[in-house]
Amino acid sequence: MSIYDYSVETRSGEDIALSGYKGKVLMIVNTATGCGFTPQYEPIEQMYSDYHDKGFEVIDIPCNQFGGQAPGSDDEIHEFCVTKFHTSFPQMKKSDVNGENALPLYAYLKSQKGFEGFSEHPYKEQLEKMFAAMNPHWRSDPDIKWNFTKFIIDRAGNVAARFEPTADMSEVDACVKALLDEKSPADVQDIIKARRSCRSFRSELIVKEKLDKIIEAGTYAATGMNRQAPVIISVRDKATRGKLAALNARIMGQPETFDPFYGAPEILIVLADRSVPTYIYDGSLVMGNMMLAAEALGVGTCWIHRAKEEFETDLGRELLSGLGITGDYEGIGHLAVGYPAAPAKAAAPRKENYVYRIG
């Protein structure tokens, strides 16, 4: 089963097949008109206004299961939203999202992305106490916890993210924007030709789902005799990133205040086992795979050298030991990863004698 096997019912009683949304980025959200989170209608409408022409759709499903905070009829709820928040996205029929009468769509969504906790928010403590009193196992229960829980669906129909109502709407916006920027896998030749090194990054971390896809692409790189000599280290911790940047700068003869990673908020490091004859080629292919995957996902990258020297130092060896990496590993490269701060420059023309043909 996929998201496209389900349907939702409009206010007028018409069944809308989600297969009609193929190729779109979707937000599926259960809403209420009398909730502390009801003002989230405003940023949702802003996102719809900003991104609808780029392929973003909102599926708004009013629900009265949480505190009875959506008591009106479908028409009354619609009138409230249009009048108060000037919403222009379509609203569906009021429905259950938990329990025996829940929409089948929600059983699928919850099976794909369970509850992972509330973000910091003024309502967080209140919500946690309420759920703990009702169900001692509430943290492991994938059910919808409250109004304005949002599922984000990517263009391929994958459930890319689940945001609880306490999540900052700027995070939701960033996730949707990043998914809209992704390129189709069918455009692989365009992706290869468009990829350029990024030397100016924004400070925010990329969406975790994107990072996971980039890393996964690296693990599927070709390796000699499929011996899979490389390993990948993902560095998101600011302190560790800072130590690596200072060490890299020192190796290249720059002051330790110099940032060789161009401000990228996260670093992927590739090392490879020297006991495998093809280790340098294998590690380089991992780097290449991750750079192309990042380009397809709208993420900037830059290959930074001096990983070999870094992991011959005490700090490098300590990092490997702390991760339980043993053996004779050589650093192949760092991949600076993040959202570009400026558009990439066009590729330089290819040299005339790049290719020679026999036959």
Image (cartoon, rainbow, N blue to C red):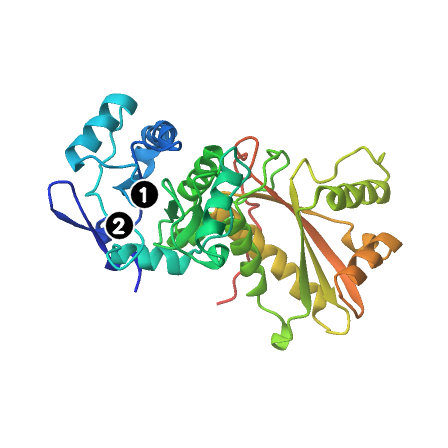
Badge 1 local density, few (<14 within 10 Å), some, or many (20+)?
many
Q: Which residue is drawn at 24% across and 29% down?
A: 88
Identity of the residue furthest to the bottom in this view = 225
Residue 30: give its label. 1
So how many labels did they put on this image? 2
199 or 63: nearer the viewer: 63
Q: In the figure, 15 relative to 50: above or below?
A: below
Q: Which of marks 2 and 1 is in front?
A: 2
User: In the image, residue 346 lies at what x, y percent?
Assistant: 52, 36
Q: Distance between the residues labelled 2 and 1?
A: 9 Å
Q: Around disc 2, counting alpha carbons within 10 Å, would you say few (fewer than 14), some (14 to 19), or many (20 or more)?
A: some
Q: Residue furthest front?
A: 133
> Which residue lies at the image location 21% right of the left edge and 32% below the top edge?
77
Q: In this view, does 356 lie above or below 32?
A: below
Q: Where's residue 14, x and y in %? A: 11, 46
Q: In which quarter of the image is the N terminus?
A: bottom left
Please state which amino acid type lies under the numbered disc 1: Asn
Give whichever of 237, 279 is nearer the camera.
237
**Between residues 219 and 121, which one lies in front from this camera angle?**
121
Left or right? Give the position of 11 relative to 241: left
Q: Residue 96 carries which label?
A: 2
State the image coordinates of residue 296 (x, y, percent, origin top left): 47, 48
User: In this view of the protein, which residue sits in the foreground, 117 or 314?
Assistant: 117
